[in-house]
Image (cartoon, rainbow, N blue to C red):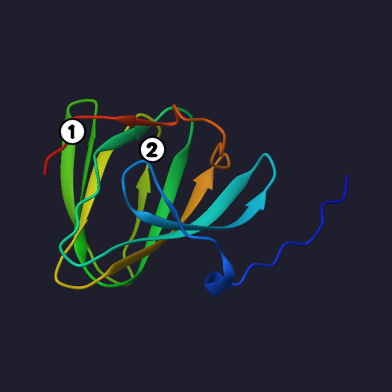
């Protein structure tokens, strides 16, 4: 099977609100494999805590500053978010993130692709903030 090439300009991607409240621009998708998006929080904004039902993510911070809290299986960690930081959110991890004094921008790969028509993918959880 041959898939079509996909090319998306960030400034032309629609902006949607993620279940955690962050602003998301969905970008490219490899059907059945992964999806890619940019998301951001305004200065001082905090996302709602969630866990994912079926997807895992890899994040890379491109600009701004903030923190992310991750909790799984009795372990928890707060990590400073700044440009150049790459981190994972394994399946079953509860997480919450917030921006500092600057707008926080992150790009992320979601594996498998984000299930667009699944309202139950991001499950609300008790958070740290």
Residue 105 drawn at (x, y percent)? 34, 66
Q: Which mark is residue 90?
A: 2
Q: Residue furthest right?
A: 1
* Residue 65 percent location from the top left of the image: 21, 68
Q: Is residue 97 left or right of residue 13?
A: left
Which residue is at a point 24% across and 38% down the rendered structure image?
A: 49
Residue lying at 14% horizontally and 71% vertically, measured from the top left: 101
In the rendered view, tell whether residue 9 sits above or below residue 20: below
Q: Residue 74: horizontal and vertical position, in percent?
A: 17, 26
Label 1 Cα crowd, 10 Å radius (few <14 / some 14-19 / many 20+): few
Left or right relative to 77: residue 85: right
The residue tagged 1 is 75
Quarter placement of the N terminus:
top right
The image quarter containing residue 73 is top left
Q: Residue at x 31, y 48 (%)?
A: 21
Question: Is residue 19 rendered to the left or right of residue 126?
Answer: right
Secondary structure under tag 1 reads strand
Q: Earlier in the sequence, mark 1 or mark 2?
A: 1
Q: Indicate the position of residue 67 as horizontal and vertical percent values.
A: 19, 57
Q: 33 or 97: nearer the eye?
A: 97
User: What residue occupies the far left of the structure in this picture?
Assistant: 129
Does 78 appear above or below 66?
above
Q: Residues within 10 Å of mark 2 (few under 14, many from 20)?
A: some
Q: In the picture, which quadrant includes the C terminus?
A: top left
C-alpha gap between disc 1 and disc 2: 13 Å
Figure label count: 2
**Mark 1 touches mark 2? (CB < 8 Å):** no
């Amino acid at each position: 099977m041959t898939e079509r090439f996909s090319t998306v300009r960030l400034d032309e991607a629609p902006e949607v609100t993620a279940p955690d409240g962050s602003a998301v621009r969905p970008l490219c998708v490899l059907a059945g494999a992964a999806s890619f998006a940019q998301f951001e929080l305004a200065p001082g904004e905090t996302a709602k805590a969630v866990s994912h039902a079926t997807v895992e993510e890899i994040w890379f911070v491109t600009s701004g500053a903030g923190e992310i809290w991750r909790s799984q299986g009795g372990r928890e960690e707060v990590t400073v978010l700044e440009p150049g930081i790459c981190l994972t959110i394994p399946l079953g991890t509860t997480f919450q993130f917030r921006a500092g004094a600057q707008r926080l921008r992150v790009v992320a790969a979601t594996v498998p692709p984000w299930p667009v028509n699944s309202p139950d993918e991001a499950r609300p959880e008790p958070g740290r903030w």
